[in-house]
Image (tube, helix red, strand yellow):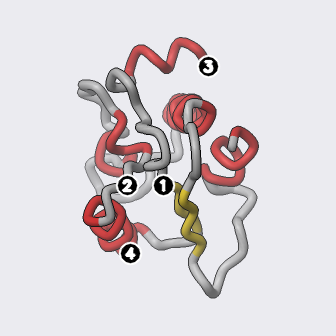
Amino acid sequence: MKDMEKYMKPNYPPVDKTFFFSGFTFSEMSAVKKWAKGSGLVQVGDAWENLNFVQVNNYKNGKGKPDTDPAVIEFRDGFSSVFAAKAKGVPYIMIKGDSNVIAGRTFARAEFPQI
């Protein structure tokens, strides 16, 4: 997990500005991320230092679908775990109102256990 820190911007995430979300469709995520940014919060996608991976842009492959390759999931979970573990102060969490925290989602697997 420590290896993932090398992909993170320095001093990220900022204190009291960390934002996590779950239960949203890929099409809804743009609005959620826009809201977070407008509120001065940062989410895991903001923490990338400089990546040229397929995972950037919600870890989608060229077909616009979530990349389910095990190596990509392992990388995403590792980076998300480090982001959550480094969160300091008050974390902000948005769960879609008509959903539960879904066990198979990154938030439940990698982020929530670290917060």
Mark 1, Cα crowd under 10 Å, few <14 / some 14-19 / many 20+, is many
Badge 2 vs badge 3, beta-carbon distance below 8 Å = no
Q: CA distance from mark 1 to mark 2?
A: 6 Å
Can you give x and y, in whole percent of width and height, for residue 58 in the image?
37, 51
Q: CA distance from mark 1 to mark 3?
A: 20 Å
Amino acid type for the residue under numbered disc 2: Leu
Rendering quarter of residue 46: top left
N-terminal-most mark, 2 or 3:
3
Question: Which of the two discs, 1 and 4, sits closer to the camera?
Answer: 1
In the image, residue 91 above or below residue 28 = above
In terms of depth relative to the viewer, which is nearer, 4 or 59?
Answer: 4
Which residue is label 1 attached to? Answer: 19
Can you give x and y, in whole percent of width and height, for residue 34 in the image?
27, 66
For the view shown, which residue lies furthest in the bottom direction? 98
N-terminal-most mark, 1 or 2:
1
Q: CA distance from mark 1 to mark 4?
A: 16 Å
Which residue is label 2 attached to? Answer: 41
Which residue is label 4 attached to? Answer: 28
Q: Secondary structure at mark 3?
A: loop
Instruction: Using residue 21 as the reference point, say whether residue 85 is left or right of it.
Output: right
Which residue is label 3 attached to? Answer: 1
Amino acid type for the residue under numbered disc 4: Glu
Q: CA distance from mark 4 to mark 3?
A: 29 Å
Residue at 68% x, 44% y is: 115
Question: Which of the two discs, 2 and 4, sits closer to the camera?
Answer: 2
